[in-house]
């Protein structure tokens, strides 16, 4: 079984000398919702718009006064005493004491303490054993009181399946509740959910409405994707001026993802006027800030000397940085560099290691290559069943080489029970995408098939939908 070699990765677009562009004017946005000093992460109840039965606390009381009030059952004092012990405010830092007072206040139904205790259990911080189910329980208590940070955290737990079964619809419902209270990150994720149709019915206009709220509340991602919506006319009218303003606003915050997206737009020169030199500038900035996709693109630029001096070593170094962040395409490219000794000494063992990592992270061409190595006994002990497993993973993502190989396995009963209808299915899918080897194999198979097997194969092929590697990730970036 020797299917064809997978196609090479696409080269980055060529680059022309840099032409300066005038930066778009920035727009005035509303202030960002302030972060809670209690969580250092999510907005406080007051900032997010949640309502508590307790009156807002004024200037800090003395530790003795807090202790007296706390021991008398004042849950606000208990929470503030926990904060003091947690952060060393007027007293020595004492994590155990802090947790005890957070728990005491939480058990009296103080929402902010419930949320804080949930975060500690979620992370296993301050000496607590990590308890995701316990964290969800406390998040839910606070969320039921309308605490925005807890609503958001509960949505994240449903999105990741942490402490509760994964449920994208429930995730989006809770995140949208937090969005309605003004949490910028929740507003952005709600927009993304409506844009992609994850957990809710796809609604581009709703997506744009949430992106607008996020953008106006200072969310950099909201600014970027609100600008992109204007650029593409998705859910709103096309407006190049508004698009440019919002995209550059996100870029000027130092956002790596915004710089990467702007680099792509300027290099491609489709929606925005082409300016490859400026595009490379932003791609380099994003790469320096650690964006893996940008790092891979920069590696490609150095490999071809496009817009930067040619340098195999520089190319290897940037590719290695992207691969270290689990970028499948960078991992696969790095495997090739180690195999060819390009920018680094040849190292077959390192090549094999990075190829497997790329396959495990969802690269269909890497999955096919791993399958081929098992089928041929090249770099691995020959193992046909393992080869077929990798071919199937590649085939399910639309790799025509994987489909051709899987079709061959079913046609010959190699590594799987023989199933000619299944062979027809995989060969025909590969042929439809132009795989010439599969076309030859299908012609050889047809005389062996009954009409019933052909009909069955066609029916199976009609039900096929490629599974993309993106589906392995959280669809609306639950984090």
Image (cartoon, rainbow, N blue to C red):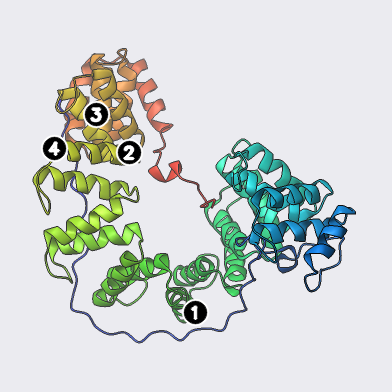
Rendered position, 155 above or below 438: below
Secondary structure type for disc 2: loop
Query: Residue at 34% of width from left, 32% of height from top?
Result: 393
Report which residue position mark 1 lands on: 242
Whether residue 385 is visible, yes or no, is yes
Secondary structure type for disc 4: helix
Q: Marks 3 and 1: CB-CB under 8 Å? A: no
Rendered position, 320 above or below 48: above
Q: Nearer the viewer, mark 3 or mark 1?
A: 3
Q: Separation of disc 4 and disc 3 at Cα?
A: 17 Å
Q: Nearer the viewer, residue 285 or 434?
A: 285
* Earlier-in-chain disc, 4 versus 3: 4
Q: Nearer the viewer, mark 2 or mark 3?
A: 3
* Earlier-in-chain disc, 2 versus 3: 3
Secondary structure type for disc 1: helix
Q: Separation of disc 2 and disc 3 at Cα?
A: 15 Å
Q: Nearer the viewer, residue 62 or 437?
A: 62
Q: Nearer the viewer, mark 4 or mark 2?
A: 4
x, y (%) of residue 195?
54, 57
Which mark, residue 398? Answer: 2
Q: Separation of disc 4 and disc 1 at Cα?
A: 51 Å
Please rate how many residues cluster around mark 4, counting C-alpha atoms within 10 Å: few if below 14, some from 14 to 19, many from 20: some
Report which residue position mark 3 lands on: 371
* Earlier-in-chain disc, 4 versus 1: 1
x, y (%) of residue 202?
57, 53
Q: Marks 4 and 3: CB-CB under 8 Å? A: no
Report which residue position mark 4 lands on: 348
Question: In the rendered view of the protein, which quadrant contains the N terminus?
Answer: top left
């Amino acid at each position: 079984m020797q299917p064809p070699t997978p196609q090479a990765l696409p080269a980055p677009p060529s680059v022309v000398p840099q032409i300066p562009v005038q930066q778009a004017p920035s727009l005035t946005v509303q202030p960002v919702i302030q972060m809670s000093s209690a969580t250092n992460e999510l907005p406080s109840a007051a900032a997010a718009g949640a309502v508590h039965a307790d009156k807002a606390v004024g200037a800090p009381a003395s530790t003795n006064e807090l202790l007296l009030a706390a021991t008398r059952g004042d849950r606000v004092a208990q929470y503030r005493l926990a904060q003091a012990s947690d952060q060393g405010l007027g007293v020595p830092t004492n994590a155990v004491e802090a947790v005890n007072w957070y728990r005491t206040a939480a058990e009296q139904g103080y929402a902010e303490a419930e949320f804080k205790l949930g975060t500690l259990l979620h992370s296993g911080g301050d000496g607590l054993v990590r308890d995701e189910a316990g964290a969800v329980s406390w998040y839910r208590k606070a969320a039921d009181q309308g605490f925005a940070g807890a609503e958001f955290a509960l949505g994240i737990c449903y999105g990741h399946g942490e402490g509760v079964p994964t449920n994208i619809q429930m995730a989006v419902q809770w995140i949208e509740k937090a969005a309605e209270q003004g949490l910028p990150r929740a507003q952005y994720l709600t927009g993304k959910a409506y844009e992609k149709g994850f957990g809710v019915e796809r609604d581009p206009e709703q997506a744009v409405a949430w992106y607008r709220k996020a953008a106006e509340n200072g969310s950099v991602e909201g600014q970027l994707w609100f600008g992109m919506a204007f650029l593409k006319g998705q859910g709103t009218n096309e407006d190049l001026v508004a698009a440019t303003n919002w995209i550059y606003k996100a870029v000027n915050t130092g956002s790596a993802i915004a710089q990467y997206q702007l680099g792509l737009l300027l290099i491609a020169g489709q929606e925005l006027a082409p300016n490859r030199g400026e595009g490379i500038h932003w791609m380099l900035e994003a790469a320096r800030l650690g964006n893996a996709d940008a790092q891979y693109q920069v590696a490609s630029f150095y490999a071809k000397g496009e817009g930067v001096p040619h340098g195999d070593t520089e190319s290897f170094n940037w590719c290695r940085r992207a691969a270290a962040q689990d970028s499948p395409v960078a991992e696969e490219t790095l495997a090739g560099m180690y195999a060819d000794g390009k920018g680094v000494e040849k190292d077959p063992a390192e090549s094999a290691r990075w190829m497997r990592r790329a396959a495990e992270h969802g690269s269909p061409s890497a999955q096919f290559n791993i399958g081929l190595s098992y089928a041929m006994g090249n770099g691995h002990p020959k193992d046909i069943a393992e080869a077929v497993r990798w071919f199937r993973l590649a085939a399910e993502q639309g790799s025509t080489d994987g489909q051709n190989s899987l079709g061959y396995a079913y046609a010959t009963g190699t590594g799987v029970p023989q199933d000619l209808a299944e062979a027809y299915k995989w060969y025909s899918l590969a042929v439809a995408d132009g795989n010439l080897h599969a076309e030859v194999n299908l012609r050889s198979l047809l005389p062996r098939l009954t009409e019933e097997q052909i009909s069955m194969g066609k029916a199976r092929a009609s039900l096929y939908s490629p599974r993309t590697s993106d589906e392995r990730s959280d669809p609306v970036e639950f984090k």
